[in-house]
Amino acid sequence: MKRPEEVIIRPIITEKSNRLMEDQKKYTFEVAMDATKQEIRHAVEKLFGVKVLKVNTLIVKPRKKRVIGKFRRYGYTRAYKKAVVTIPADKELDLTGV
């Protein structure tokens, strides 16, 4: 099993993830592409000291983006794995130190 620091790469902070945090206690993280749900659950429980109720994962596909320059060229964003972790309603995670 991997170390928790290798599984959780960074928290994802967007308007939608902030709404999920406040309303439903769901936290969004970018995780390693080969991480399983059990490894993600274990990593969040070790790093933050809370019990995880549910883990949902998805792979975000790369999108085509225009590269700024003299010519019309296109590049792609990178693909990554995202995990949405649900915790009990009375708990809260501190994402500032991650």
Image (cartoon, grey):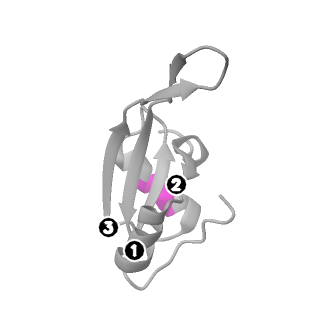
**Label 1 belongs to which residue?**
25
| Circle 2 SS class | loop
**Does the stretch in magenta take in 30?**
no
Q: Quick one: label 3, few (<14), some, or many (20+) residues within 10 Å? A: few
Residue shown at 48% from the left, 43% from the top: 31
**Label 3 belongs to which residue?**
53
Question: Label 2 sits on what residue type?
Answer: Ile
Q: Position of residue 80 (x, y in %)?
A: 45, 35
- For residue 12, the mark is 2
Q: Quadrant of the C terminus?
A: bottom right
Image quarter of residue 21: bottom left
Real-space Cα separation, disc 3 to disc 1, in angstroms: 10 Å
Residue shown at 41% from the left, 63% from the top: 16
Mark 2–mark 1 CB contact (< 8 Å): no
The residue at the far bottom in this view is 90
Real-space Cα separation, disc 2 to disc 1, in angstroms: 14 Å
| Closer to us: 61 or 69 | 69
Q: Earlier in the sequence, mark 2 or mark 1?
A: 2
| Image: magenta residue range | 41-45
